[in-house]
Image (tube, rainbow, N blue to C red):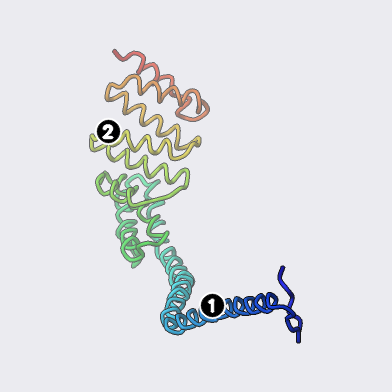
Amino acid sequence: MATYKKRGYKPKTKAEREQIEELESTTAEVFNTLDESASKTEAWVAKNQRYILIGIGVIALAVLGYLGYKEFVQKPTETEATNEMFQAQHYFEQALTASNPDSLFTLALEGGEGKYGFLDIIDKYSGTKAANLANYAAGMSYLNMKSYEEAIKHLNDFSSDDPVIGANAKGGIGDAFAQLDQNGEAMEYYEKAISHSTNDFTTPLYLMKAGVLALSTGDKEKALQLFNRIKDEFPNTDQGRNVDVFIGKALSMQ
């Protein structure tokens, strides 16, 4: 059993003296080890302090740079790009209801009245939300102008989780491939448009387009599958009210 060493305490026996000496030796060794470890750590920090500070500085600058970029570069650029696209968007909306829309689609794409067109926005404001939307509008403009390869290019460059616009972009690519008689690719993109979201506007629309395409290529079973889905899930839509005619055509196929 260890003996507690009080201040001024003198060991009475040889065994007590040896026990106290051993305790003192162990304690001293522990403190020496701690001092040595602390010294090594301090030496390492002192030796590498420059690199540590540089590392911390790099991280701090990266964070501040990112925040500064978002606040002072990205936000103003987004605002500027959106403002610059206003006139092109106006031409595009006019074209959608015009009897001879090609000239208006051209103005929307190339610009007019000293204002940028969608192609300028894509080029000058690459990476912005406005440029992304300009790709969608440019793709749809080219699709209406029967420039199908250009339509595919721009609609492929567009990305959106929006249930309607995102589906329309994929469906537009399907339309372009169908016009180029690339039926396999057209069906692929119609199916992407169908699976992008479920709603009463785009889903029955692209189910119908896919069904008509399947019908035109002689795939009776696929056509019936697509038409029956419209009948079962979207009976109150325009496509649902007319789908029986197409089901009849599919059933009459040999």
Q: Is residue 186 above or below residue 34?
A: above
| Residue 117 in picture, x, y percent from top left | 33, 60
Residue 44 is tagged as none
Q: Quadrant of residue 132?
A: bottom left
Residue plotted at (31% across, 51% down): 154
Identify the mark nearer the N-term, 1 or 2. 1
The type of residue carrying mark 2 is Gly
What amino acid is found at the position of numbered circle 1 in the picture? Thr
Residue placed farthest to the bottom in the image? Answer: 8
Viewer-side label of 1, 2? 1
User: As displayed, is residue 75 above or below residue 48?
Assistant: above
User: In x, y percent, where is residue 18?
Assistant: 65, 77
Q: Is disc 1 placed on a helix, strand or loop? A: helix
Looking at the image, residue 216 lies above or below residue 111: above
Q: Residue at x 42, y 69 (%)?
A: 77
In front: 44, or 49? 44
Q: Is residue 103 left or right of residue 240?
A: left
Relative to the observer, which residue lies in front, 147 or 31? 31
| Residue 178 vertical position relative to residue 9 in the rendered view, above or below | above
- Label 2's element? helix
Q: Position of residue 106 (x, y in %)?
A: 29, 54
**x then y, percent, for residue 71:** 49, 71
Q: Which residue is mark 1?
A: 33
Residue at image x 37%, y 39%?
171
Q: Which quarter of the figure is the C terminus placed in?
A: top left
When asked about the image quadrant of residue 214, the answer is top left
Marks 1/2 in contact by CB < 8 Å: the verdict is no
Going by the picture, which residue comes out furthest to the front? 14
Q: CA distance from mark 1 to mark 2?
A: 75 Å
Label 2 sits on residue: 184
Please state, as top left, top right, bottom left or bottom right, where the N terminus lies in the image.
Answer: bottom right
Dot 2: few (<14), some (14–19), or many (≥20) neighbours within 10 Å? some
